[in-house]
Image: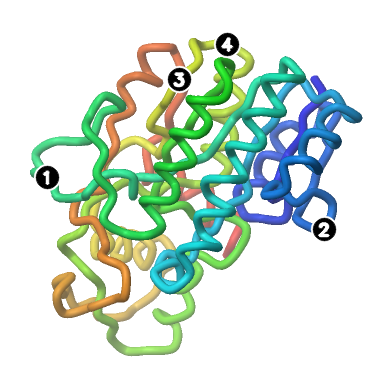
């Protein structure tokens, strides 16, 4: 397969490049391809003729986005729209990465969001990512949108931060009332690979590791597996105020993926595998 990967230096893109290393890859970052420039995207896709476009480019600084709406909209919405237009003209399949932030995050924690649930973002990041989803759906038919959350892997991420803090401090405070699924970038890359390999129906898929936890319990598991002794104090979201509101419920149901025979590992298993590499 001939695959164009955008945002190729990012954490997920590194995992995608490794998973698809047997294929013909065209890896670009903004220096090679500015996805916000339609003319450049059209020309690049026409010249390279990829069968698949995996869009890993995004404005993901959730707090910074609150002050940078125009830039976030350009990267998270206009960029995917341009790729969708080019993909349709070139008969390529577009694979776009989205987020739990397209929901309000206030669903009762006895439930997990499904792909059919009503969106309702409350942050600039979530709003612009939803605009990106809508642009993809409106401009091409052959697409996969994978919504993910709590992503970690080869790059700056929550697990690395906790490992560092746990070794440096005697105690730390961690939010205990936000629920979701940690997602190992290697496993998300493999979900994308399986979707292509099995040729599952086009559409939106929730794509995190299986099982649910909180940031507090996630941290406890990190320290347990890494043999770190550090007191962890559970705190509320209200005690840990950030510019962008964090969703209390980031839980995404993976039943649609599982229905199509996609392997989705448990988050604890994923964390163990990551730490074997990281430690």
In primary-sequence order, the first of circles 4 and 1 is 1
Is 75 situated above or below 259?
A: below
- Mark 2 and mark 1 in contact (Cβ < 8 Å)? no
**Helix, strand or loop at mark 2:** loop
**Residue topped by disc 3:** 203
* C-alpha distance separating marks 1 and 3: 25 Å
In primary-sequence order, the first of circles 1 and 3 is 1
In primary-sequence order, the first of circles 1 and 2 is 2
**Helix, strand or loop at mark 3:** strand
**Residue topped by disc 1:** 109
Q: Give x and y (percent) for residue 51.
A: 76, 20
Horizontal placement of 13 versus 203: left or right?
right
Of circles 4 and 2, which is in front?
A: 2
In primary-sequence order, the first of circles 3 and 2 is 2
* C-alpha distance separating marks 3 and 2: 30 Å
Q: Colour scheme of this structure image?
A: rainbow
**Which quadrant holds the C terminus?**
bottom right
**Residue topped by disc 2:** 31
Residue under the point 75% across and 51% down: 34
Horizontal placement of 189 versus 49: left or right?
left
* C-alpha distance separating marks 4 and 2: 33 Å
The answer to whether residue 276 is seen in the rendering is: no
Residue under the point 60% across and 48% down: 12
* C-alpha distance separating marks 3 and 4: 14 Å
In primary-sequence order, the first of circles 4 and 2 is 2
Of circles 1 and 3, which is in front?
A: 3
């Amino acid at each position: 397969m001939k695959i164009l990967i955008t945002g190729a230096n990012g954490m997920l893109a590194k995992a995608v490049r490794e998973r698809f290393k047997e294929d013909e890859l065209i890896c670009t970052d903004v220096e090679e391809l500015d996805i916000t420039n339609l003319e450049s995207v059209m020309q690049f896709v026409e010249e390279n003729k990829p069968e698949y476009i995996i869009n890993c480019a995004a404005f993901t600084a959730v707090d910074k986005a609150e002050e940078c709406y125009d830039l976030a909209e350009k990267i998270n919405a206009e960029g995917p729209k341009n790729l969708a237009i080019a993909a349709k003209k070139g008969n390529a399949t577009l694979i776009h990465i989205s987020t739990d932030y397209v929901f309000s995050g206030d669903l009762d924690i006895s439930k997990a969001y499904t792909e059919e649930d009503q969106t309702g973002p409350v942050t600039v990041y979530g709003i612009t990512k939803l605009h990106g989803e809508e642009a993809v759906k409106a401009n091409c038919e052959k697409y996969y949108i994978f919504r993910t959350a709590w992503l970690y892997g080869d790059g700056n991420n929550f697990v690395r931060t906790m490992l560092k803090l746990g070794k440096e401090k005697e105690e730390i405070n961690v939010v205990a009332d936000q629920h979701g699924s940690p997602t190992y970038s290697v496993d998300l890359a493999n979900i994308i690979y399986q979707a292509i390999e099995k040729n599952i129906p086009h559409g939106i898929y929730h794509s995190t590791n299986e099982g649910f936890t909180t940031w507090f319990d996630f941290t406890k598991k990190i320290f347990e597996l890494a043999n770190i002794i550090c007191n962890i104090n559970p705190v509320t979201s209200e005690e840990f105020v950030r510019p962008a509101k964090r969703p209390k419920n980031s839980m995404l149901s993976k039943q649609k993926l599982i229905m199509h025979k996609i392997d989705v590992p448990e988050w604890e298993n994923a964390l163990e595998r990551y730490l074997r590499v990281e430690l």
